[in-house]
Image: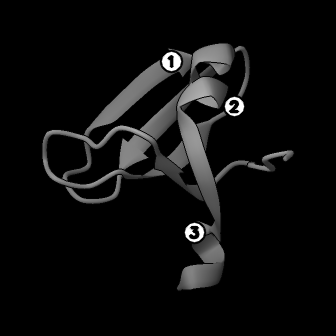
Amino acid sequence: MEKKYKLNSHVIMKKGHPCGTNEWIVTRLGVDIKLKCVNCGREIMMDRLEFEKKLKKVIGDANEAE
């Protein structure tokens, strides 16, 4: 299964964030991926390989949801 994600994509990670959600928005792409928590707004960065291991599902584009 190939997982397609791009800038502003909503993604669900395998492990939840301490604030209680596992939904994130992709805010930066490159060697490192920057994610913003949908619930609390915390931003984290992780390398692309780690991100692809922890990625569970791509929901869609954040702009489409509005």
Residue 62, placed above or below residue 48: below
Query: For the residues marked 1 and 2, what is the alpha-carbon distance in whole angstroms?
Result: 10 Å
* Residue labelled with disc 1: 46
Q: Position of residue 13 (x, y in %)?
A: 46, 44
Tell me the element at label 1: strand
Q: Residue furthest bottom?
A: 66
Residue 57 placement (x, y as % from top left):
61, 54
Q: Most extreme residue toward the right, as rendered?
A: 2
Viewer-closest of 23 and 8: 23
Nearer the observer: mark 1 or 2; the answer is 1
Which residue has dot 3 on it?
62
Helix, strand or loop at label 2? It is loop
Q: Which residue is at the front of the view, 56 or 42?
A: 56
Which of discs 1 and 3 lies nearer the camera? The answer is 1
- Look at label 1 and name its amino acid: Met
Residue labelled with disc 2: 29
The Cα atoms of the two marked residues, 3 and 2, are separated by 15 Å
Q: At label 3, which amino acid type do we have?
A: Ala
Q: Whole-percent x and y of residue 26? A: 56, 45
Residue that appears at 19% across and 52% down:
40
Residues at circles 1 and 3 in contact by the CB criterion of under 8 Å: no
